[in-house]
Each structure stands twice: as structure tokens, then as C-alpha cells.
Amino acid sequence: MDASISLQLTDRLDSVAAKIDEMGMRLDALMQNAETHGEIQIEVVKLLQHMQHVQLELDGKVTELSNAVTTTADGSFRSDLSKIGLAFIHDSRQKALEIASLKQSANIALRDQTRGIFPIRTVFLIQSIPMWDALSDVYDAMVADDRFDPIIISIHVATLGRGVFEGEDKVSSTFSEKGIPHLRFNMDDSYAALDILKALKPAVIFRQQQWDMGVQPAFRTQELTFSRLCYVPYALSLAASLGDPVVTDVSAFGFDQPFHRAAWRIFCETPKIQEYFRSFEHSDPKKFITSGFPKFDRLLDDNKAPSWPISHKDRQNFKVVWAPHYSLGTGGGLGFGVFDRIWESMLSWAKQSPDIDFVLKPHPALFGSVLSPEARTIIRNAWNDLPNCTFSEEQYGQLFAASDLMISDGLSFLAEYHLFNKPLVFFDSQNHVEFNGLGKLAEAASRRVTTFDQLKHAVLEYKDGKVWEFEEERKALLDNILPHRGKASAVILDTIAEGIRDGLN
């Protein structure tokens, strides 16, 4: 590629920028007239479509240029091409930033079109059934409330932001089995799905996680701001750090992501969680609402309907849930997981203990992306071959209700299992990041062990009738994590309805 091509590309960029400026001025003019909402919407859609086309064109040109740049024998860039390339890439980046800024302005204009409109169309973008407990009560409450028009949409996920986007079929299948109506966004081209989502004109969108890399590009924060983003955390945060440097006493990964900053309302499980969100001082503090945790309300309801997946004709076994975390090793991550250190000992113990049932309830990421495919197959087959062992990888409230005890190395189950008032043995890796204040309460309410022999001894003590010795610590934890017991969904629905009715930003 020579200088003439570079000039052609620069001219093209200038032409694109002029078109965007022209459309931006047209949008500004329309927005000054409150009686032209329909026309605004048409122009905004045109602008967004044009910007998407331009962005794809710029991406293609950058790729073309990068492929044209070569290196010399000593590994350096050829000077003439590198100068052209760096200038073009810099110019392209500036244009992309301008496009992103205009897109956000257009999205805000679109969002304004749903102000004060009832019923409130609310979309739930669902990528994980195990996480559905956090939102299922909210959805059920909306179905029964004339103020709301809820829609579930199943989408793909890349666990921990790694690998391919997949799994929508499993999510959809589970909803179908439960008789829950939903739409399916199983397209490889997520922007084709985004066109459908925008046509639905949702006033509110719930997403299950704050991290953008786990969802396809069209479902990331910057693409969804045409609607009001709402968030109910999928699990209670117990760690001070999620592998990132801690600026305050809590993790920015957990409480100050772009999704958090862009959200319209974030519903906090406890007053302490609300403090964590507000401590970063990057958002209007009024958008952080202490609602209580709908997931806890659902788990407490599940306590009334226990269900255990293993049965024996001639006996009732002691029922143990083994819930390993995914964060194995000490390589700078969370460091809670000990599965790689104890799984063979657990398998051997299970073989020698036909009077104990073991249900393996792993963190979704452990068998989803952390273990190799070969390891998953070997472990799963060896475990399932035993008559007193099985896997559980879906929702778990009824499983916990039926169990007698949990073994876990962290994290969120250290709080959740205490809702069932049963012994919890915490295997401390001694390599993990620090607990935050709530995490310390959860740890104090658990039986802590650091070796497999200690673990086995503790479980057998409770099997033989040992009285749980941490009742006061458990009460302190539950007093902190159940601020609106049984009413979390009602608080969330009322907050959203009042905000839409009053046109609150």
C-alpha cells in the first residue's frame, strides 16, 4: 500500500465524518421540538444503522492496512508503511470514538421514548440457568403485575469471557421444560439479534452479570443504553478483591464496571453492599437501592420443597453437597479453589462410604472452562459410576433444602447455605484473596478446615449428631443479609414503576 491509498482512505474518513456531523445536527434540531418524537425515532434509527455500517467499514480498512505492513529481517517495521499505518490507525481510532459518542447520544434519545409508558416492557437477557434464581422471583412478580410486560430472551455465553459463545440451547431448553415463554437469540451475528431487541422497544433491560466479555458484542453495555439498564447481582459479594488491585476496601471488578456506571438502577442485597457501590463515587448514589436479595427469598421458598437426586431402596443416607469453586491455584486469581488438591481423596472417600450420598455441585466455570475436556470426562465418569454420587449443575435451592451438610471452598455458598440452617464445612485454601466485611461474617459462621483429614473428621462428627456450634455467628450473618425478607421483588418492581412514571433519570 502506498501514500495514494492512504490519502484515499483519509478522504473517505473525512467524508464519513461529514455525514455523521450532518446527521448529528439533524438529530439535535429534531430533539429541540417536543412534538416530533416519531420523527426523532426514525432519524435515530437511521443514524445508528449508518454508524454501524461505518464502524464495520473502518474495522475492515484497519485490518487491510495492518496486513499490508511488513517487517524487516531484524523485526522492525518498514518505515514508509509504518508511518502511514500508524497515522491511519490513530485517525481511525479518533473517528471510532466520535462514532461511539454519537451512538450514546442517539441511544439516550431512544430511551426517552419509553418514559412514562405502561405497561413497562422489561427484557431479561439470560445466559445462565444456575444464576436465574437471582431474577426468577422478579420475573414472576412482573408476570402477575399489570404495570409490567416482561420478556425473557435466552442468549449465548462465554464462561469467564473465554472461548466461544455457546449454551443458548441449554438455557432455552430449561425454560421450555418449565413452561416459561421466551425468545431465542441463538444467532452467531449478535447484531442481527440487537435489531430485534431494539424493535421490541424495552423500557428496561436486566442482564445477569456486570462483565461485558462474557456476552456477545451486541449485548455489551455500550450497545444497550437505548434502554434503562437494571441489575440484581447474581451472587452475594464476599471477597474484597476479584483479582484486581483494591482501591477502596472492595473490588472495582465487582462494583465499578462500565455496566455499573451506565446502569439506571442497581438493586443491592444489603445496606453494606449499597455502601460498597457508592464508595467509588462514579455514579449518582441514588440509583443504588437497598432492595434485599430476591435470590434469598427464592431459596427460602425452596426450603419448603426439598428434592434429592439419589435414592436407595433399603436405607436413608447422610446427604452431603460438595460445592467446589473454580479459582484453582495461586496465579493471581481469587485462589479459593482446592478441587485439584482433593478430588481424588473425595472420590476414594465416597467409594468407602456407601452410607453417605455426595452431590457434586461445582461452580459453572470449573467444568465449563477451567478443567481440560479430558479432565472433565475422567472425573465426571468416575464420580457418576458410584451409586452414592451424582452431579448437579442447575438450580439448587431444593437440593440444598434436602441435604444434611455442605462442603465448600467458597465463595457465595458460604452465605447462601446458611439460609437452610445446616452445617457448612469451609475448606480454606489459605491462598485466597481477603474477605470483605460480609465475607468475614460468612467465614465466622462456618466450620473452617485446612486439610482433607480435618474435612473428613468434621463431616463425620456432624453425621454422628454433633450439635452445630456457630449458631450466634450464623444469626449475625443472616441479620445482615436479609434486610427486606420476603419483599425484595416488591421493592424492585415499585422502584422501577415509580421511576418510569416520574421520568426519573
Image (cartoon, rainbow, N blue to C red):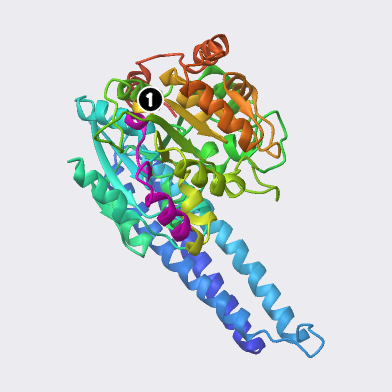
Residue 191 painted magenta = no
- Circle 1 sits on which residue? 294
Q: Residue at x 47, y 20 (%)?
A: 464
Within the image, what quadrant is residue 5 found in? bottom right
Within the image, what quadrant is residue 272 found in? top right
Q: Residue furthest right?
A: 74
Residue 28 position in % (x across, y down): 44, 47
Nearer to me, 395 or 70: 395
Image position of 267 (left or right of 186): right
Q: Residues within 10 Å of mark 1 (few under 14, many from 20)?
A: many
Q: Is residue 186 above or below residue 291?
A: below
Nearer to me, 298 or 499: 298
Residue 103 position in % (x across, y down): 46, 53
Nearer to me, 65 or 470: 470
Q: Amino acid at mark 1?
A: Pro
Dividing the image into 4 quarters, which one contains the N terminus?
Answer: bottom right
Judge whether residue 198 can be spotted in this image: no
Q: Which residues are magenta?
A: 376-399
Circle 1: element type: helix
Residue 435 position in % (x across, y down): 65, 29
Image position of 399 (left or right of 289): left
Image position of 159 (left or right of 35): right
Residue 394 painted magenta = yes
